[in-house]
Amino acid sequence: MSLVIDRSGTMLTAHTCYIVPDDAFSEDEWDQIENFSDSEIARIGAENGRRVSDESDALDIIARTLSGSEWTPDMFDAIADLIRSTGRTISDIQ
């Protein structure tokens, strides 16, 4: 498990944190968030973000998959699926 520490010194676990992208809200909406309660902020994170632990877990799985193995096309397909599971897009060759 990972530990996230914000600038104020609050310690959080990666399994309870969400990454909310900048484009999830307008600038005005971001400014309004500062006035929300902790429970409202938690809801916003869950509804509009992706879990930090999903990314951390995906990287751990990718590292285990690549370590000590002969790399195959099937392996890269599985890795691409893991990356997509974190909310990222992988484009096909054009």
Image (spheres, rainbow, N blue to C red):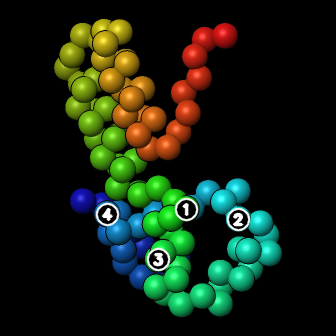
Can you tell which quarter of the image residue 21 is in? bottom right
Check whether the beta carbons of the residues at disc 2 and disc 1 lie within 8 A of each other.
yes
Of mark 1 and mark 4, the one earlier in the sequence is 4
Task: Tell which tag, 1 or 4, sits nearer the viewer.
Answer: 1
Q: Secondary structure at mark 2?
A: loop
Depth check, front residue: 7 or 58: 58
Residue linked to disc 4: 15
Inter-mark Cα distance, 2 to 3:
15 Å
Residue linked to disc 2: 25
Inter-mark Cα distance, 2 to 1:
9 Å
Q: Secondary structure at mark 3?
A: helix
Q: Quadrant of the N terminus?
A: bottom left
Image position, residue 23 (x, y; %) = 70, 56
Inter-mark Cα distance, 2 to 4:
23 Å
Depth check, front residue: 39 or 14: 39
Image position, residue 32 (x, y; %) = 71, 82
Can you tell which quarter of the image residue 67 is in? top left
Q: Quadrant of the C terminus?
A: top right
Q: What amino acid is labelled 2 in the image?
A: Phe
Image position, residue 93 (x, y; %) = 60, 11
Can you tell which quarter of the image residue 76 is in? top left
Q: What amino acid is labelled 1 in the image?
A: Asn
Q: Secondary structure at mark 4?
A: helix
Task: Tell which tag, 2 or 4, sits nearer the viewer.
Answer: 2
Q: Which mark is residue 42?
A: 3
